[in-house]
Image: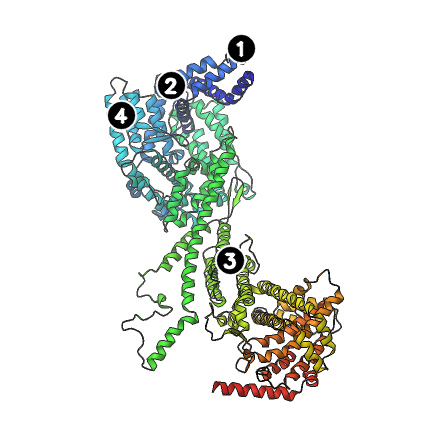
């Protein structure tokens, strides 16, 4: 077990231990190189041998940073000690690197103090390199007012020179990071501090950098607090009181003024970059001559953003306003615009600089080489190769898409700088500064041809945001909260594309971690932007729905009432009652300064949509994000929820919105959504299709109820209550189906109903329902209603089975009145049969209304298709196979067309077939059901509610619905049992007419109270049936009786109304 623990310790700590060993070896190599540089007395000047000087200073800063970071690892001693102990126990001896490594850890306990001692011999080389920055750093570290007065980065300040190439003797220094220079100066002069006392230029640089920042970036989010560290180091050196006072003064200046100075710089850069991006978007050809301006602008902006990020997170501020920039998104956005221009118009820049290199740079360099007094062979060969490489370039190479690679040339120039910068060089670059400056310019030009992407990373990489996630998210939230800045919010997801540039090939294991962070942040930003847009759209929709609601017919009642009262000079209402505002008053403006809530919402939406629409897609770590799709998906989800919410369905109270009002709201919502296409290039029709088609199904794609299921549940619960309570009231006359009005209507009653039936079932409401639910939804509604009918038919069949023997006898004895009368008395549940058939008739009447409304809607939307279906249905040959005919009927029924045989009813009743009963027995029960209904009709005459009303073209207790029930049930049952529908209905007519003729001979006034009204049922049944004719009725029931019955009921209604 102990052996296993030792091996586990070695395995787990090896990575850390050998990383420390690598640091030690790196330190050894750096010390060796620095000694070599001192021995060679290398000349350093950032304006001449730029690459050599920059790399030298980078080496010093990297070495310093590394040793500081090493000292910050608290467990460093424990790690190497434990590893070495485990190594001793395993191998019997210490690790060979352990003694030196342990000594290094002890020596560098206070790294800067140790390095100050180390760098005493390197002081001259380092201070010379740093002092060469006096031509560059002060020029870069200017105030915003100085930039503004110099019209820095402006292309249009001097129109006459707009096409002239941007030139400088120190090209690479122009876009050199200010942050990098400050690190060189601070760390450099800490290590070679003697120069601060001996050279005023060094002291000036040092003080300027200390006043600009309070902390520096060591690595990613690790920072170095300058003033405290410098003061702690200098306090122990004799004679440095002056320097300590300088540090304290600079610290006070940095805390007091640095924040405001950088704030003003960011403010200037926002306008400068906006101008630059706008001009280059219009004239991309200027990217050639003014490329330097672009990279300067990017570098300046990047420095300011990183400064803010670093200081906002690490410094105790005197004024927090200077460290909270709500407009930072705008600056990042213009940086991204410039980067996009460079990437898009890269070939334009290549063409320009290929011609520049071959036509100008090669000639000038050749002249300079020719004029050299001394030029050793090696240097001469390298110079000649530069000239030849540039001379051989041509525009055709760009046009042919040839890939350029000048890395070899740049590496040769780096070697040449090294050769010519040592003290004993026969060709000293210190004596030929023009050559160095010219070559620096040429190197910049070569980068414009083959290294544009690398240049963008060098000057504008903001991958540091990856390590400041909290600040990054906070900036994003501030951006969204400020409507004027929300148009720039896309810059945050775009920044996530930078993150992978902070990875390194020597540390591949962190690629996944950084990649995942970039994906999660990008996803979160785009999702939040889409949510914000969705919320704005929802608020606009709510406003528009309110305005649409004002135009509903129900709101004009008060206006009409006021007009009528005014005409009749009736004074109703209280004095001083405010006059109701009419719809449309919100559009009246007295002046343009009045801004309504709707105006603000539209403005905010247009700003945010600009951001969402800015890029079609973006690639983050090999994943493609499409901002518009985020908005589309959020709109789909919200539209779905809104439609369902607008139904206002309350299961407890069974309240629901009227279909016409819901349709008005949905149309208002859709109008707003369609207007989104003016802001963002999204296919809103796809949203409508996805959402509205799902609403025609029972459940949507998330398994949530739809308006189809809500309205179906509401109507079926109405019919369920019709069976239980409410619809018993219907059958007793509380709600009646009025064929004349094609609606269900409430009748006067003591118990008021919870809803007005007419408001939900008239033709306009049914059309609105059909418009909302569509053919699919109406089919689902029909199927649900058919389930109720099938349950009623099942109950009727049970009643038939109870009376089967009596009904069988009555079927054959309809011409024997006495026997029929005796048999009728033996029947049980006669009222129940009629009530259940009436219920079926009421449901079928409702379905008929729904189908008619669906046909009207479809005829408006797809008239040619509906007429084709109708033509197909009307021309089915009689001899067609029933299966084929049923398919046609199903198609017709889906289009809302009435059919001789209802396919939905056939399907519902087919599912009832019992396994215990033979088909012959089922057929017999169906026949006897028709007999039962036929012989039961006379009992309706005794019901006081059976009176026929000519005004409504029906009976108050809905028995007129029996006509539809009898025809539809007979057609469905005898289709299922393959019987003759016509023959069975003839039999029914014979039995019914025979039974009704008997009540004509009755003398009891109670029994025959509404005899004439019931007679009319026969006429209704024949009128409703596609299988019976008036001739057939005439043969069974004298027409004169029908005529007299109509006359009697009309006469009775006139006298009743009088």
Closer to the observer: label 2 or label 4? 2
Percent across and percent down for residue 211 are: 28, 32
Q: Secondary structure at mark 1?
A: loop
SS of the residue at dot 2?
A: loop
Indicate which disc, 2 or 4, sits on the residue closer to the N terminus. 2
Q: Position of residue 1056 (x, y in %)?
A: 49, 85
Q: Secondary structure at mark 4?
A: helix
Which badge, 4 or 1, comes first in the chain's sequence? 1
Q: Earlier in the sequence, mark 1 or mark 2?
A: 1
Q: Secondary structure at mark 3?
A: helix
Comparing marks 4 and 3, which lies closer to the viewer? 3
Where does the image place residue 348, in percent across and percent down from the top left? 48, 45
Q: Is residue 611 visible?
A: no
CA–CA distance in space, label 4 to label 1: 59 Å
| CA neighbours of label 3 inside 10 A, class few (<14), some (14 to 19), many (20+) | some
Identify the residue under disc 2: 109
List the residue tagged with mark 1: 92
Q: Earlier in the sequence, mark 3 or mark 2?
A: 2
């Amino acid at each position: 077990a102990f052996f296993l623990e030792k091996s586990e310790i070695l395995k787990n700590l090896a990575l850390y231990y050998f990383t420390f060993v690598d640091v030690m070896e790196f330190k050894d190599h750096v010390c060796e190189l620095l000694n070599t540089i001192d021995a060679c007395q290398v000349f350093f000047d950032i304006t001449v041998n730029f690459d050599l000087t920059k790399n030298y200073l980078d080496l010093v800063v990297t070495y310093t940073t590394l040793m500081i970071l090493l000292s910050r690892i608290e467990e460093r001693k424990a790690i190497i000690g434990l590893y070495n102990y485990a190594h001793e126990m395993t191998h019997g001896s210490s690790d060979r690197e352990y003694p030196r490594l342990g000594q290094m850890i002890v020596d560098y306990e206070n790294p800067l103090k140790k390095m100050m001692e180390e760098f005493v011999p390197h002081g001259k080389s380092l201070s010379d390199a740093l002092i060469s920055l006096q031509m560059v750093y002060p020029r870069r570290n200017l105030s915003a007012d100085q930039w503004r007065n110099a019209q820095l980065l402006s292309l249009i300040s001097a129109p006459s020179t707009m096409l002239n190439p941007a030139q400088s003797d120190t090209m690479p220094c122009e876009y050199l990071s200010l942050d990098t220079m400050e690190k060189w100066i601070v760390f450099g002069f800490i290590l070679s501090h003697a120069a601060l006392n001996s050279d005023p230029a060094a002291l000036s640089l040092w003080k300027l950098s200390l006043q600009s920042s309070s902390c520096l970036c060591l690595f990613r989010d690790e920072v170095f607090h300058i003033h405290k560290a410098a003061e702690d180091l200098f306090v122990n050196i004799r004679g440095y009181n002056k320097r300590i006072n300088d540090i304290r003064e600079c610290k006070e200046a940095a805390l007091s003024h640095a924040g405001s100075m950088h704030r003003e710089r960011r403010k200037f850069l926002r306008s400068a970059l906006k101008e630059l991006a706008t001009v280059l978007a219009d004239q991309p050809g200027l990217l050639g001559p003014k490329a330097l301006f672009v990279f300067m602008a990017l570098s300046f902006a990047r420095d300011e953003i990183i400064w803010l990020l670093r200081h906002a997170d690490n410094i105790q501020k005197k004024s927090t306003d200077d460290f909270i920039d709500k407009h930072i998104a705008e600056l990042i956005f213009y940086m991204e615009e410039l980067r996009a221009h460079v990437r898009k118009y890269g070939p334009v820049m290549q063409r320009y600089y290929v011609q520049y290199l071959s036509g100008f740079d090669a000639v000038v360099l050749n002249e300079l080489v020719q004029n050299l007094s001394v030029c050793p062979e090696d240097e001469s060969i390298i110079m000649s190769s530069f000239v030849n490489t540039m001379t051989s370039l041509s525009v055709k190479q760009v046009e042919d898409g040839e890939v350029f690679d000048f890395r070899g040339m740049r590496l040769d120039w780096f070697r040449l700088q090294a050769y010519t910068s040592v003290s004993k060089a026969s060709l000293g670059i210190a004596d030929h500064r023009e050559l160095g400056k010219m070559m620096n310019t040429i190197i910049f030009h070569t980068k414009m041809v083959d290294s544009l992407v690398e240049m963008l990373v060098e000057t504008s990489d903001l991958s540091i945001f990856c390590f400041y996630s909290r600040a990054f998210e906070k900036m994003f939230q501030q951006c969204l909260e400020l409507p004027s800045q929300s148009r720039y919010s896309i810059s945050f997801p775009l920044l996530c594309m930078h993150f992978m540039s902070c990875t390194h090939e020597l540390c591949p294991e962190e690629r996944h971690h950084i990649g995942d962070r970039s994906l999660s942040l990008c996803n979160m930003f785009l999702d939040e932007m889409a949510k914000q847009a969705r919320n704005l759209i929802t608020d606009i929709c709510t406003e528009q729905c309110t305005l649409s609601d004002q135009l509903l017919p129900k709101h004009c009642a008060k206006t009409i009432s006021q007009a009528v009262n005014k005409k009749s000079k009736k004074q109703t209402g209280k004095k001083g009652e405010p006059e109701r505002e009419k719809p449309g008053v919100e559009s009246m403006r007295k002046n343009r300064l009045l801004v309504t809530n709707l105006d603000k919402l539209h403005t905010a939406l247009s700003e945010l949509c600009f951001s969402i629409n800015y890029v079609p897609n973006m690639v983050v770590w090999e994943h493609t994000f499409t901002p518009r799709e985020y908005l589309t998906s959020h709109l789909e989800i919200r539209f779905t929820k809104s439609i369902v919410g607008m139904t206002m369905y309350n299961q407890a109270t069974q309240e629901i919105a009227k279909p016409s009002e819901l349709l008005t709201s949905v149309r208002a919502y859709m109008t707003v959504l369609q207007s989104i296409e003016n802001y963002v290039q999204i296919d809103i029709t796809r949203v409508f299709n996805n959402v509205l088609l799902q609403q025609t199904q029972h459940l949507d794609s998330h398994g949530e109820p739809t308006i189809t299921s809500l309205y179906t549940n509401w109507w079926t619960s109405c019919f369920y209550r019709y069976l239980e309570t409410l619809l018993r009231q219907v059958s007793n006359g509380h709600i009646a189906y009025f064929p004349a009005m094609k609606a269900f209507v409430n009748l006067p009653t003591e118990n008021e109903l919870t809803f007005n039936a007419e408001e939900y079932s008239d033709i306009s409401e049914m059309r609105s329902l059909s418009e909302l639910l569509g053919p699919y939804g109406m089919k689902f509604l029909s199927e649900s209603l058919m389930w109720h009918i099938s349950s009623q038919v099942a109950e009727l069949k049970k009643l038939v089975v109870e009376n089967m023997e009596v009904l069988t006898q009555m079927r054959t004895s309809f011409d024997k009145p006495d026997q029929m009368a005796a048999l009728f008395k033996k029947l049980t549940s006669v009222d129940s049969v009629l009530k259940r058939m009436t219920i079926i008739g009421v449901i079928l009447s409702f379905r008929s209304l729904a189908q008619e409304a669906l046909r009207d809607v479809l005829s408006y939307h797809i008239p040619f298709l509906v007429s084709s279906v109708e033509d197909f249905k009307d021309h089915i040959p009689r001899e067609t196979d029933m299966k084929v005919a049923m398919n046609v009927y199903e198609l017709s029924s889906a289009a809302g067309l009435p059919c001789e045989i209802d396919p939905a009813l056939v399907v519902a009743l087919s599912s009832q077939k019992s396994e215990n009963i033979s088909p012959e027995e089922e057929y017999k029960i169906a026949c006897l059901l028709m007999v039962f209904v036929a012989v039961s009709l006379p009992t309706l005459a005794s019901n006081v509610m059976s009176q026929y009303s000519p005004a409504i073209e029906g009976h108050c207790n809905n028995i007129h619905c029996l006509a539809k029930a009898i025809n539809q049930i007979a057609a469905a049952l005898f289709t299922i049992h393959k019987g003759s529908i016509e023959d069975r209905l003839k039999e029914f007519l014979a039995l019914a007419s025979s039974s009704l003729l008997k009540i004509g001979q009755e003398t009891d006034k109670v029994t025959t109270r509404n005899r004439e009204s019931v007679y009319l049922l026969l006429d209704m049944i024949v009128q409703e049936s596609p299988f019976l004719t008036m001739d057939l009725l005439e043969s069974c029931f004298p027409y004169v009786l029908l005529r007299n019955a109509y006359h009697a009921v009309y006469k009775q209604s006139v006298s009743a109304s009088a």
